[in-house]
């Protein structure tokens, strides 16, 4: 794996990353946890274009084709029984699920093989040098204010029995986010709902066209994926203003919730 670099070779200081601190909702934990706020996800074509923009003599398509060939071979090598060291990390396989006795056979209904990625020392080094600012107390007053997630079609009342700001694990036909100033308006890339599992890093994005209830107090969408247990983050991005004269940039509201 890639080793750490001398400080002189690391280049300019990276842009600041922002965190939001909230009280942990996990049972038995009385502490505050931080989550990294919205970071855009880019694909290999964007990476290739970034290389080309830095005056590479190769075409973007060459990089993308080469990467896809290497990626396919990595998949096949993993199936052939290898862990693969690809520079900024190494693939590893772990066995999950409980066994009742030493000689119990592997049962795919109870047990799974799960891929893991072990980061390289340089990847850890480069991540650790990113400047961080806690903006929990400094978010825009006129940004979206998501308050809680829910499976109910009506806002909470004093008689509500649903656990507050929690979802059961699994797939749900629809999920709602309740709050204020939630209406999704504007056509910039960040307008929509970003969901992220803090533990696994899996991300899902729902643009306004995939949100079938889009009001200032409620957003409702169809997830079409399984929620896994643990801490999740919802980020609502919008250019909405009460006067309907859109902000020039997206403004974001952040919410952490628990899947149990």
Image: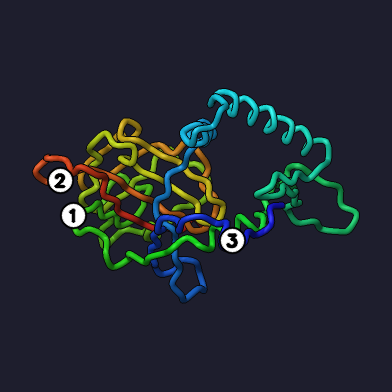
Query: Is residue 110 in sight in this rendering?
Result: no
On the picture, is 245 further left or further right than 50?
A: left
Q: Earlier in the sequence, mark 2 or mark 3?
A: 3
Q: Are marks 1 and 2 in contact (CB under 8 Å)?
A: yes
Distance Cα–Cα, label 1 vs label 2: 8 Å
Q: Which circle marks residue 195 in the picture?
A: none
Q: Residue furthest bottom?
A: 30
Q: Earlier in the sequence, mark 3 or mark 1?
A: 3
Residue for point 50% across, 42% down:
171
Near mark 2 (Cα within 10 A), the count class, few <14, some 14-19 or many ≥20, is: some
Near mark 1 (Cα within 10 A), the count class, few <14, some 14-19 or many ≥20, is: some
Q: Secondary structure at mark 3?
A: helix
Residue 158 percent location from the top left of the image: 26, 63
Q: Which residue is mark 2?
A: 241
Q: Which residue is mark 3?
A: 125
Q: Which residue is mark 1?
A: 142
**Image height of 30 relative to 110, above or below:** below
Residue for point 53% across, 26% down:
60
Residue for point 48% across, 52% down:
168
Quadrant of the image occupied by residue 219: top left
Q: Earlier in the sequence, mark 1 or mark 2?
A: 1
Question: 197 or 179: nearer the eye?
Answer: 197
Distance Cα–Cα, label 3 vs label 1: 36 Å
Query: Is residue 25 in sight in this rendering?
Result: yes
Question: 108 or 253: nearer the eye?
Answer: 253
């Amino acid at each position: 794996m890639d080793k750490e670099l001398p400080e002189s070779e690391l280049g300019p200081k990276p842009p600041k990353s922002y965190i939001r601190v909230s009280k942990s909702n996990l049972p038995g934990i009385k502490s505050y946890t931080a989550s990294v706020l919205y970071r855009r996800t880019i694909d290999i074509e964007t990476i290739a274009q970034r290389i080309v923009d830095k005056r590479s003599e190769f075409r973007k398509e060459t990089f993308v084709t080469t990467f896809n060939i290497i990626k396919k071979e990595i998949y096949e090598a993993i199936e052939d029984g290898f862990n693969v060291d690809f520079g900024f990390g190494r693939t590893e396989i772990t066995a999950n699920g409980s066994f009742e006795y030493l000689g119990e056979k592997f049962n795919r209904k109870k047990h799974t093989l799960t891929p893991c990625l072990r980061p390289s020392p340089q990847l850890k080094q480069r991540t650790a040098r990113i400047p961080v600012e806690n903006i929990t107390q400094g978010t825009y007053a006129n940004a979206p204010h998501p308050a809680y997630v829910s499976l109910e079609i009506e806002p909470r009342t004093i008689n509500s029995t649903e656990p507050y700001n929690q979802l059961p694990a699994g797939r749900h036909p629809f999920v709602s986010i309740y709050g204020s100033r939630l209406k999704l308006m504007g056509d910039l890339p960040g307008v929509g709902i970003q969901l992220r599992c803090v533990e696994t890093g899996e991300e899902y994005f729902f643009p306004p066209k995939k949100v079938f209830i889009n009001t200032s107090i409620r957003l409702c969408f169809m997830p079409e994926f399984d929620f896994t247990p643990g801490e999740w983050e919802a980020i609502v991005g919008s250019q909405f203003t009460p006067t309907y004269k859109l902000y020039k940039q997206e403004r974001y509201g952040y919410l952490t919730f628990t899947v149990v």
